[in-house]
Every structure is written in C-alpha cells, then in structure tokens.
Image (cartoon, coloured by chain):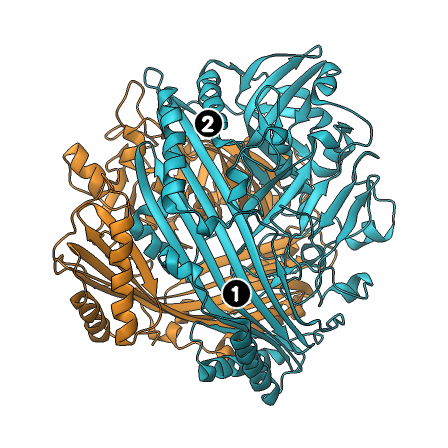
Chain colours: A cyan, B orange
Amino acid sequence: MTTKQTRMKRRDFVQMAGLGIGGLSLPFMGKELPIEALLDNPYDTALKKQLADIALNAAKTKGATYTDVRIGRYLNQFVATREKKVQAVVNTESYGVGIRVIADGCWGFAATNNMSKDAIADCAMRAVAVAKANAKIQGAPVQLAPQKGFGEVSWKAPIEINAFEVPIKEKVDLLMQVNDAALTGRASFINSLIFAVNEQKYFASTDGSYIDQDIHRIYPTFTVTKIDRATGKFETRNAFSAPMGMGYEYLHPRAQDKVPGISTRYKMRYDILEDVKAAVKDAEDKHKAKSVEPGKYDVVLDPTHLWLTIHESVGHPTELDRVLGYEANYAGTSFLTLDKWESKKFNFGSKLVNIVADKTQAGSLGAVGYDDEGVKCGKWDLIKDGILVNYQAIRDQAHIIGLKASQGCCYSQGWDDVQFQRMPNVSLQAGKTKLSVDDMIKNVEKGIYILGNGSFSIDQQRYNFQFGGQTFYEIANGKIVGMLKDVAYQSNTQEFWNACTAICDESDYRLGGSFNDGKGQPSQSSAVSHGSATARFNGVNVINTARKI
Amino acid sequence: MALLSKDDAQAILKKVLSYSKADECTVSINATQGGNIRYARSAVSTAGEVTDTSLAVSASFGKKTGTTTINEFDDASLQKVVARAEELAKLAPENPEYMPLLGPQTYADSIAFSSKTAGMSPESRADMVAQSLQVAKEANLEAAGFLVNSSGISAMMNSKGLFAYSPESSVDFSVTFRNREGTGSGYVSNQYNDVSKLDTLALSKIAASKASMSAGAKAIEPGKYTVILEPLAASDILNGVIRGFDARSADEGRSFMTKKGGGTRLGEQLVSDKVTIYTDPLNPELPGDTWNNDGLPIKRTTWIDKGVVKNLSYSRYWAAQKGVEPLPGSNTFIMEGGNSSTEDLIKGTEKGILVTRFWYIRMVDQQTMLLTGLTRDGTFYIENGQIKFPVKNFRFNESPIIMLNNVDELGKAVRSGSCILPPMRIRDFTFTSLSDAI
C-alpha cells in the first residue's frame, strides 16, 4: 500500500479541502450532489450501450484492433464529525467515459467527462492517436488472452440496505451518539466518520460484452484521543471496524457477529457504540501501559491486525505486474520471481499456510461479477501448504505465466484512469483443527497479543517489514499479564510466514481490509479485503518505538 | 474549455453568483488537461490523455452550508447547481465553526504557468520518453519510468466581492533503471513547472549510472551512522514536517509541537541553528499557490529561523479563537543550504552512508514524529572521503526532528519535487535492520 498525491488529482483535492474536509485525507473523487440526485439514476443501460457502440465504432474506424469502453458513475458519501460538531456532509458524483484501445500493437487511453456523442467519438479517436504515437517506441506488441463476449449481462452486490438511501440525519445521529459516548467516557477528542461508495460501472468491448454492475462499499470508523496535559503525552485508539463490501446493514449489530475476548471484535456486523466505549478505556490504559522490552517474542495476531500484514507481505508480492517489473518505478518489484514459482517448491511459509485469491467472497471489498476488462471473476490458490503456486494476472500478462485466460484482476478507480492489474481479496485460510484464541495463548510462554493495525512499512521487493498496532498485551506463561505500548515488530516475509505455528479455526475467521490501496502512475486507489483467523508466529523481533524530542 | 482566461472565468463566476439567494455564496472553477506515458520493461505500458472541468458552489444560510458541483456550463445547469447547493444548505446541520466569508483580497500573480508545458502532445511525450529508453538500450539496462504533464486554472469568487484566479502547469518525470541480473537499481525523480527545464536524457543517465554503481551491494551492520542524504532523500523524509506546523493540533495537545504542561513550542529552539525553513510562492524555481481555499493570500512565511519555531499555521476559525491573524499552511517549502555539492559533502566524510532516496515512510509515533522507512535505489558506504562500495538497503527508525538536531553540514539547495532543499550530512542516523530488496 502506498499513497502519493499526484499533480493531476491535486486540484480535486484542493477544491475539496476548501470544504473543510481536506485534513481527513480520504480517497474521494468527483463532484458533489444532493442525495436526491444520487438516487435518481438518469443513465439507463440502453443509453450506455448506444454511447459505448459509438466509441467502439469510432476507434475501429481509426484503426484500433481492440477497444473497451467504461462508462462509470462513481458516488461517494461521507459524514465526518468531531466531538459535538458535524464537519462535513458530502455527496460526490463523477460521471464520464474512459476508452482504451490497441492500435499498431500498442495501448492508448483517453477519457472525458463530456458525454455528448461527438465528444465520445472524439475521445475514442484520441485514444487511438495516443496508441499510434507510442507505437514507435513500443517493444513487443500487446498480447491479449482471449476472452469470450458475455452479451448483455449484469451483476449487483448482494446488499440489504443501500447506504445512500439511509437519511443523512440517521448517520449524523449515530455518529453524535458515538462521540457523546466517547466524551462521556472522558476521551479528550473523537473523530468519527461514515464513508459509503457506490460504483455504477458499464463495460463494453469489441469482444461482444456489455456488462452493467452495481458495487457498494461502506466504512464506519473513529479515532479516540486521550491527552495527558501534565506529561504532554497523547494516546489514540482507532475503531476495530473493517471497511466492507456491504450496505448500511453492517452498522446494525447482531449478537452472532461479536467475537468476545480481551476486546470485542466483529464479523459481518459492527457495533460502533460498544466499540467506542472500549476504545476510550484502551486509550486511557495505554497511558499507564508498560513500555515494551525489545527482543524476540511469539506474536499472536488478531485478524484486525493480521489483514494488513497479509496485504503487504502476501498480496503485493504475488501481483504479477510487480513480479514482471511493470511497477519497478513506483510500488516496486517482488521477491517472488518466476523461477521460485516454476520450481514448485518455494517455501513461502509453513505447511499451515494456505492463502487464496478470491474475487467472489460475499461482503468483501474486492467482490465483483466481472473485472474492468470484461473477465468473469473467480477464486484460486496463491500459497498451497506453504508453497508458492500462483500469481494475480490480467489479460495482457496471462500468456507470460502460461495461462490460457486472465484471472480477472483488472481494475480502475474511475472512468478517468486506465485499468490495470490490482489485488483481488487475498486471505489466509483458517486452521483445519479446532483451536480458540484462549487455547492458542495458553501455549505461549513469552509473547505479545496484537489487535488493530497501526504503522506499516515494507520494502519495494517485500522482504523486510515493520508493523505497529492499536493495542498490545503481554503474554507470560500462557496468560495475558497486562498492556504494553511502544511496540512494533520487524521481520522478513519468508521467515515470518515460516514461523507461523498455529492458526485458529473457522469460528474466529474475519475480514479486514483497505479502502485505499495505492499503486500505479498516476497513482490509483483500490479497495481490497483480507480474511484470516488469529495466528501465531514464533520468535519475531520486537523493537521499542519510544523516543524523546 | 480546459484553459479559461481570467476574463472568461470571471464572467462565468459572476453569472453563477447572480443566481444565488443565499446569505453567503462562494463559487469556484477548476479546469485541467494533461497526458502521461508510463513505461516498463523498456517499452510503453500505458499512456493516456484526460480533460476535466468542474464548478463548485457553496451556499450558506446562517451557519448552515451546502456544496454541490457540476461540469456542464449552460445557463439551466448553472441555475440548477446553485439551487441544489441552497437546498442542501437548508438540510445541513449548523456548523459552529462557520466563518463569515472574506471580502476582496489582494493576491500576487501566480508564476506557476508555462505555455510550453501546456503545449505538450502525445508526440512530444513519446520523444522525451524515447531518449530515456535509448539510455537503457545503450547501457543494457531495464527502464521503467513515468512522464506526466498537466495544466489548468483555478478561480474563485464570493458574494462579498472576493475574486482569485491562477493558471498553473507542471510536468513530473521519474525513471528507475535496473540491471538484467536484478542486482543493481538507480532512480531519479523531479518536477518542474516549465518543461524546458526537464532533460529526460540527462536525468536518465544519472539513474543508469546509479543502477550500475549499486550492483553487488555488501551487507553492513545496522546501527547509528553519519549519513549524507541527497536532496531527494532529504525531501522524502522532511516533506511531512511543515504540514505538522499546525497551531490547532499543537494547542489541543496532540502534536509534536505540543509543549509539556500545555501550549505550543512556538518560539522554542526545536532543531539545529543551521536550519532555516520558509515558504515563498513566488520563488521562480518552485512557484506555488498565491491564495488558498479560504481566500487567504499565501505570502512568504518563515517557519523555522536558525532552528527556532517562528510560525505555526492558523485556520481562520482557530485564529479567531486565539485572537491572532490567520496564517495559511503550505504544500511547498524551501530549506536554506550552503555552497557545497553532494561530492564536497562526501569528500568531507570520514565514515558514513550515502542515501539516494527513502521509500515507504510511515509515521510510527505522532508524539515524536518517529518515522520508519527504507533506503532504495543506490545506498553506498563512504570512507575517508570516498564512495567505497554499494551497501544493502537499511530500514530506519528516526524522527526528522532528531535528525534536524544532528545536522553536520548542508550543501547547495536545489528543487526536489515540491521543495527546495540542500543535500545534508547528518550524524547518528538510526538504521534498525537490513533489507534484501534491490
């Protein structure tokens, strides 16, 4: 995960910053509209098909041998508050068309927000002109894996409550209750936020597909801050929620989705009011917590934490574009080189480690019917019994690893960015034998139990990483003996996953995820989930992060 | 209509304001056009052109504000966008931090626009990238790079008579060269407003030379080292510091600028007296915005003078709370340097590490600004004033505040991305582990 504000997007950012929300650093885009306009979808599929055909024909006339057209309407809504104030209620919409072509064996792309028939035809011709200008400095011609056309099809995320149909007042009231609970509990500050996304995507290609999709995501979150004026120190605790590929139902708590323990954690439903009370106590306790003694510990990692370690150390190095060098100038390459995969015996992790890529998992951020180049989505193994067995590929890469078809990993953050290879959901499979978190901790002599994600950093080939967390508990002789602070662990990906000695069973399996995974130039954001059960890693190097300035 | 003239922008904004019935109203236009080429494995991977224009309207009744935008410019659309903003304002909760709009202001003319940059085409971009690819071919290296240009205007007008307009352009170029064995990697990156300052051939040669020089790196023990940070490495690590000079978070007790017992560190000696940092939107090498979205003029401002904190930024609301003048923050900064080159700094180093750039920098502790990250694309061991051999990349855990207290010598300041700053020699920089990454 990387983020870098590109120059082209900066103006959008500055304009939004003028609304008083710039400090929130959210991956928003587009223009703002009142809610009633968002619900009134003026663009039916018949019109979109007509516009798409104009682009397909115009590109062909100019000499394109392949064309795809993405007509996208991207809606964001967020309600942001601090303490007793609503900072921003924002609806954004972005509508436009992105046209990608192959001409003279080279890719070209152009995008416009002008949706007149003439402007779309002109945009298609500009995409061809870009391809032809670059063909003279192109190496080998683009080789696309074959993809059959699906005709006119559609896919909708299986949500129960469309977050965009829930009145603003209901969201404001909920967040005000959250903030009240925090302030009543003597938090110094609280920031809270509900962020909802709806992507209405229409895809058409010269393969004969016309695909209409409706995708929803939601992310409720908060940060509680507790200040100690006398010492000048402050401590924070973030929400244990996850961004989900769900509707507003995620915010309706349900008993069966609560995981009891030292902190309550959540599966497919989240209890934000319960979590904020726990967060205030945690932030207070962190002031009194013992500063960690650096050294080797067995770490027990909760899914609220482990998702990010999976994302950085498994998700990114198995991206085929990184392996091949397409990201060398930005996100980096990968230590999982093709020879390691070809050997069929590269020990990525211990035999317990089974990791799957999955674009179909219900409730996940990455779930879609078809990717952004018209490939039907599926599920496959990346790491099987600890061995590297596969990567994540798109159509113009499939032939390089001998695949007959793409794995459906193509995504663009909007109509105005070109689609490219992005991470599917990448998840650690739960242990096959019954094991609870309590039983796991009972066997740990000297360890640290880590919940929530904190600071994260990993090198450009994904060997060396360092992760923090939200809360840390010292384990001594099978028991939790108190809270720790100033904890971060450093390891090497292959050593770390080979030190995985236990994984809890399916009953502990939960999703975490990122709303804004950054990659590509210009940098694009994508949303992706990572599932796991609590897992144990032996002998991990822990450092103390306290400093004085 | 990507590049609106000042008169055209003013005419549209006036017309939109004339439709408003709100107590207060602000209207702004952003228009951009640009293109890019991305290349990897020594060939173009993606390339594109994008245009977009948007109009934003913020209408307020009392302390209730609604904001909408649109990207169609016929009269009916303009009337609709104002009406929608007013509807939304009536539905919005009151914002107790709402500040009445500013009246007319005087701004310096922005010098951030270059017609040469605005005139770039798919062909001119392809020619510039071809030069970089030629370097790769001649040196038998793999090249991966990115060239992007954008141009546009921002304009704003409000119902109290304020009007602001700025054109801007920029071009960014970066390239990574790697040897075929994957044992060496070199990188350059820079940004300019005027494309005639960009030499993709010269920059590519620097990256290619680093790729060759960095091959066969040796592992040395992590620990505290004297480091020489090239301007790119220094900007990587110092970029976030000025954004932390915010009075409100310091007053609230949640910033590295917070003073023990309450208050801020304004006026304190925070870092070495060798350090002076300011912003200046009229610096010709690094032209910046001359106004912000509150309508406040952005002027030359000193943040650190000989190590002493001289200013913190105040939003209009927080300034009113504290009874001081508002002071806009900045996205760019200039750090003063000396006259030495990076080579001079190397010559004056008995034992140390030369760092080309840092990567994946994240905040570990907001309290101390402790950062972690790694070296990348060319890290070298220096002994007796000479580069001896390339070394494996390190992970560091270091606070830029501690680092700026350990300044040994500063070289000549140059532009790197959105700052101007010198190469610097720093004592006791903390590397905590080794990375196998190349």
**Quadrant location of the C terminus of chain A?**
top left
Secondary-structure class at tag 1: loop
Which residue is identified by label 1?
A: A417
- Disc 2 marks a residue whose amino acid type is Val
Q: Position of residue A265 (x, y in %)?
A: 59, 28
Which residue corresponds to mark 2? A276
Spatial CA span between label 1 and label 2: 37 Å
Q: Quadrant of residue A130?
A: bottom right
Q: Amino acid at mark 1?
A: Asp
> At x 82% / y 51%, what residue is drawn?
A341
* Residue A269: % across, % down: 57, 36
Could you tell me residue B322's position as x and y percent?
18, 33
Q: Say which of marks 1 and 2 sits in front.
A: 2
The residue at 73%/64% (across/down) is A397
Chain bearing tag 2 is A
Q: Chain of mark 1?
A: A
